[in-house]
Amino acid sequence: MTKEVIELAEAGAAAPRLPRLLYKISEAAEILGISEMSVRRLIFAGHLKVSRRFRHLLIPRVELERFAQRAA
């Protein structure tokens, strides 16, 4: 732990949140401004790569950023 985080913890402040690395399909749809079905179609077509963890399809943040840059 960094000195800053330790000081915040001792002061009773919440530790800073780590950035999200993976998103559910519903969250990715909201971020991209499209429907969940559209996200599933993009996954099926190979336009979005997913990570399968614990029976869930999770989309890495970098994959969403890559897709958004290419779509713009």
Image (spheres, grey):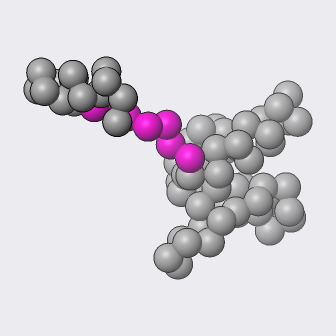
Rendered view: 6 above or below 38: above
Relative side of 54 to 13, left or right? right
Relative side of 10 to 49, left or right? left
Residue at 86% x, 63% y is 46
Residue placed furthest toward the bottom: 55
Bounds of the magenta span? 15-21
Which secondary structure is most common in the magenta stretch? Answer: loop
> Looking at the figure, which quarter contains the N terminus?
top left
Give residue 4's position: percent from left, percent from top: 31, 21
Residue at 66% x, 39% y is 32
Q: Nearer the viewer, residue 4 or 56?
A: 4
Rendered view: 18 above or below 8: below
Would residue 33 be seen by someone viewing this image from the given angle? yes
Relative side of 2 to 35, left or right? left
Give residue 45's position: percent from left, percent from top: 86, 64
Picture quadrant where residue 25 is located: bottom right
Would residue 35 be seen by someone viewing this image from the given angle? no
Give residue 48's position: percent from left, percent from top: 78, 55
Give residue 36's position: percent from left, percent from top: 61, 56
Residue at 80% x, 40% y is 66
Q: Nearer the viewer, residue 65 or 35?
A: 65
Picture quadrant where residue 61 is located: top right
Relative side of 51 to 10, left or right? right
> Looking at the figure, which quarter contains the C terminus?
top right
Rendered view: 39 above or below 33: below
In magenta stretch: residue 33: no
Q: How many numbered marks does the figure carry?
A: 0
Residue at 28% x, 31% y is 15
